[in-house]
Image: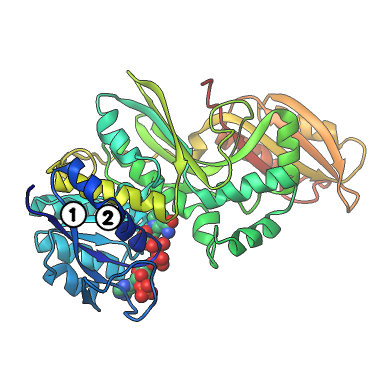
Amino acid sequence: MSEPLKVAIAGLGTVGIGTIQVLTIHADQVAARCGRPIQITAVSARNRRRKRDADVSSYVWFDDPVVMAKEADADVIVELIGGSSGVALDLTREALAAGRHVVTANKALMAEAGAGLAIEAEASGKTLAYEAAVAGGIPIIKALREGLGGNSFSRVLGILNGTCNYILSTMDATGRDFDDVLKDAQDLGYAEADPSFDIDGVDAAHKLAILSSLAFGTKVDFESVYVEGIRNVIAKDFEYARDLGYRVKLLGLTGELDGGIYQWVHPCLIDAHGPLAAVDGSFNAIIAEGDFVGRSTYEGRGAGAGPTASAVVADLMDIAAGRFNHTFAVPSEDLRNAASVQVEKRVGAYYVRLKVLDQAGVFADVGSAFRDHRISMESIIQRDHDSDGNVHVVIVTHDVLESQMMDALEDLEKHEAMVEAPHFIRIENLGGE
Ligand SMILES: NC(=O)c1ccc[n+]([C@@H]2O[C@H](COP(=O)([O-])OP(=O)(O)OC[C@H]3O[C@@H](n4cnc5c(N)ncnc54)[C@H](OP(=O)(O)O)[C@@H]3O)[C@@H](O)[C@H]2O)c1
């Protein structure tokens, strides 16, 4: 068998230790499948004395991962520390400059610094691989870049954040409020102590920016992603949505529109019997729509040691087998700068929840506000009295331009009977299976 591929791992946390476990437990199988062994030679983390779930004593230890990236006896540096700047960025650049391949699970790094790093990887003729950065248990990078490589994509969308999906599906199943469920998710280890990256949609936005670049041949453009998290979805929304035949999910959606590219992350109502509706808990799911393949759907665990390490090892096996891929599918110089399509250009249906004073004439006023903005309603239903005696009114519209919808809501907000700002959730038509 050929010479081993030598690997140095920076970061010995959840994913780093998971990667060591896969490479150790499946050493023979991995070697058989890629034609040569993969051998860990060096590791780095902050605390050398920390007890870990893998024996790292036989590997050369580096206190400084940036020094390791330059000096370790390794063909590949695996970056499993995290963060879009600082040590993760420094060690990645150092490794590429030193002529080593890099494998990372870091979506923040790839979304925010990926464009520049891809150029640096190409200049050194090395691979920069990141299958683990998006939905670890779903090989979606490989699917978009290779398996579906013969297609033009119209859109790619999905449930990209397991923490949000866990919170939303638990709220749906139990009728409990957001804060309550978030606290449980933190206690169970599904959500970080500082959950904002997940629940405010930033993590999903990082992943969406990467998928968008791959699917549409554009420069990765995280700054242009429209992001709305799940903090404003209340328990009642799940009840009303269910009665209307919908479920609530946080989706990332990217596609071509008016000659530009949209990248939107926001809560959506989706058909309760359609695609993605049954994807619950911490699972991720992604749909790619291609002109020849049609719809292709993937589901799997998006995070955790096993699924993420599985993706890291897949990248290492590609490198070991000599399979080279451009970072974002095509040479960096061929990636386009696409115009970003603002969410105001979205055309679709809306679910609107109003909290109004329980008084005569409000229903008619709401109806006329929508009529004034040429928005046709599919339904308008007076729902429950709230504990404060006010009334919920729930409206479902037909397709309308988002900017028109926002104008109508702005007018409605000024109405004297309005107790709080109107709340809306976009209704996303995902079509049939
Ligand atoms: N966890 C997941 O499920 C998951 C899923 C997909 C992608 N990812 C990505 O994978 C990466 C790693 O995540 P993780 O969950 O494994 O993180 P983690 O458990 O917090 O581990 C981070 C590791 O990095 C080390 N580290 C931090 N700062 C360092 C520094 N300045 N120098 C050297 N080592 C340093 C830590 O050392 P000590 O152990 O000594 O403190 C720790 O071993 C992140 O980019 C994350 O976004 C994670």
Tell me where residue 159 appears, x and y as whole percent: 50, 41
Q: Which mark is residue 23?
A: 2
What's the residue at 34%, 53% (across, down)? 309
Q: Tell me, for residue 38, which label it has, or none.
A: 1
Q: Is residue 216 visible?
A: no
Above or below, 291 relative to 205: above
Which residue is at a point 65% across and 60% down the rendered structure image? 184
Three-letter code for the amino acid on which mark 2 is drawn: Leu
- Say few, some or many: other residues with alpha carbon within 10 Å of mark 1 (under 14 / 14 to 19 / 20 or more): many
Judged from the image, the quadrant occupied by ligand 1 is: bottom left
**Crowd band around label 2 with a 10 angstrom C-alpha radius: few (<14), some (14–19), many (20+):** many
Question: Going 75% across and 26% down the picture, which residue do you hit?
Answer: 379
The disc placed on residue 186 is none
Instruction: Name which residue lies at 24% across and 39% down.
Output: 336
Task: Tell me the SS state at disc 1.
Answer: strand
Eyeballing the image, is 282 above or below 87? above
